[in-house]
Image (cartoon, rainbow, N blue to C red):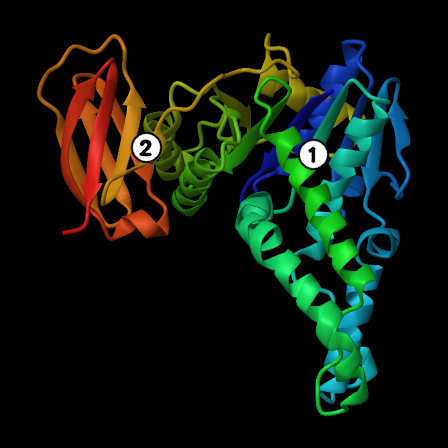
């Protein structure tokens, strides 16, 4: 099953683009489900009709779904929530407050991603289009399996065995906190395995892609660039960038001249940051884009002759690899001859220029403190060395 995840800064129009993608794919004869993992439930607004927790048919071959977080909690979190509530109550927290504290931040969005696993297992659709939460929340969720893996594989089994030995004594000593039952550890293991399987689905670059939606605005572009770097780090394939709400050529009023110049300037930044990834565009419309007719028009502008379910780009524009006491940022440039390299770094921003090739990327926070120590060409790749000091 083809899976496409749309993310971007809040308010850039990713819900409309996700819905438009699903509509265009269904019009080509595919059976498509578009699903929102965002608790804001804006997908119903895009279709201008009510959408429930079960897939609802919007048009021929097109279904839409929003999350029922109550049932997702019951299926995936109830045992863990029960133990955490008991632990907070032991510390003197009010029962209602304890139940709220047991719902960790980001769980709503995470439960939405777990639905990806369910739909892939059921195989009822040709494609699943995900309207994900804003970029920051989505990146945290997508990186969660990597952050949890060491703990779950190394420490978790030790804690489980220790709790089994100590539990009888702790139950008789009221001064000690309640220890989790074995069923709680089992539920935690199942939960980790579920989100790890979602990672496997979304990192399969032949069947899954991430698409970044942004506007031609400085802060939005900065967040999208940072998101792209993090997605590369965790091996998620970005196959397209959608620039939404560009001023159309038909707008000639001098009032918008400054805005048009700013958008043209920002488009150069976008092209320098994401090329050769395809950059799709959509204009600023003179109406609100909701309902099937408007979504169809949006889809035509975004994709034109492109097939919305195709993998539009394979590979990564750059890789970050550990090398000794630092890191190398590797750019694949097989056709570029060895020549002088214009290299500069300011804070988290790395600028590389080789001939007509220009790349401008934002580095992760862990690399922002490192200095650019030089660059070299090796087997068709430009390696920029980042070292401490």
Instruction: Name the residue nearer the viewer: 5 or 84.
Output: 84
Q: Give the numbered dot on residue 130.
A: 1
**Residue 126: x %, y % from top left:** 78, 17
Residue drawn at the location 51% of the way across and 36% of the way down: 214
Residue drawn at the location 72% of the way across and 51% of the way down: 189
Q: Give the numbered dot on residue 265.
A: 2
Q: Is residue 170 above or below residue 351?
A: below
Disc 1 crowd rating (10 Å Cα; few below 14, some 14-19, many 20+) is many
Which is more N-terminal, label 1 or label 2? 1
Q: Is residue 104 left or right of residue 181?
A: left
SS state under label 1: strand
Residue 98 visible? no
Residue drawn at the location 26% of the way across and 34% of the way down: 328
Q: How many marks?
A: 2
The Cα–Cα distance between marks 2 and 1, rounded to whole angstroms, is: 30 Å
Instruction: Name the residue nearer the viewer: 213 or 315.
Output: 315
**Residue 155: x %, y % from top left:** 58, 58
**Residue 380: x %, y % from top left:** 25, 13
């Amino acid at each position: 099953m083809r899976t496409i995840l749309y993310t971007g800064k809040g308010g850039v129009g990713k819900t409309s683009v996700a819905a438009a993608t699903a509509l265009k794919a269904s019009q080509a004869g595919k059976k498509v489900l578009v699903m929102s993992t965002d608790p804001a439930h804006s997908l119903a607004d895009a279709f201008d009709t009510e959408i429930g927790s079960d897939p609802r048919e919007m048009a021929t071959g097109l279904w839409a779904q929003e999350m029922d977080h109550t049932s997702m909690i019951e299926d995936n979190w109830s045992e863990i929530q029960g133990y955490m509530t008991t632990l907070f109550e032991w510390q003197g927290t009010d029962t209602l407050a304890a139940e709220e504290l047991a719902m960790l931040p980001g769980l709503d969005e995470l439960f939405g991603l777990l639905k990806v696993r369910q739909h892939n297992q059921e195989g009822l659709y040709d494609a699943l289009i995900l309207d994900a939460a804003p970029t920051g929340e989505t990146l945290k969720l997508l990186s969660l399996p990597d952050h949890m893996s060491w703990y779950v594989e190394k420490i978790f089994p030790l804690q489980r065995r220790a709790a089994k030995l100590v539990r009888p004594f702790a139950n008789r000593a009221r001064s000690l906190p309640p220890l989790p039952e074995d069923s709680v550890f089992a539920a935690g293991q199942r939960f980790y395995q579920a989100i790890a399987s979602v990672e496997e689905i979304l990192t399969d670059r032949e069947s899954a892609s991430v698409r970044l939606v942004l506007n031609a605005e400085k802060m939005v572009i900065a967040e999208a660039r940072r998101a792209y770097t993090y997605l590369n780090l965790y091996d998620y394939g970005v196959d397209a960038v959608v620039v939404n709400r560009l001023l159309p050529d038909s707008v000639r009023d001098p009032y918008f001249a400054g805005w048009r110049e700013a958008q043209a300037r920002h488009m150069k930044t976008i092209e320098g940051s994401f090329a050769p990834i395809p950059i799709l565009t959509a204009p600023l419309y003179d109406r609100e884009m909701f309902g099937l007719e408007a979504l169809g028009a949006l889809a035509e502008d975004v994709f034109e002759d492109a097939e919305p379910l195709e993998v539009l780009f394979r590979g990564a524009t750059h890789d970050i690899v550990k090398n000794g006491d630092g890191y190398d940022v590797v750019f694949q440039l097989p056709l570029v001859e060895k020549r002088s390299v214009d290299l500069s770094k300011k804070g988290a921003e790395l600028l590389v220029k080789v001939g007509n090739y220009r790349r401008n990327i934002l580095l992760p926070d862990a690399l922002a403190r490192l200095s650019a120590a030089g660059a070299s060409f090796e087997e068709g790749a430009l390696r920029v060395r980042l070292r401490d000091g």
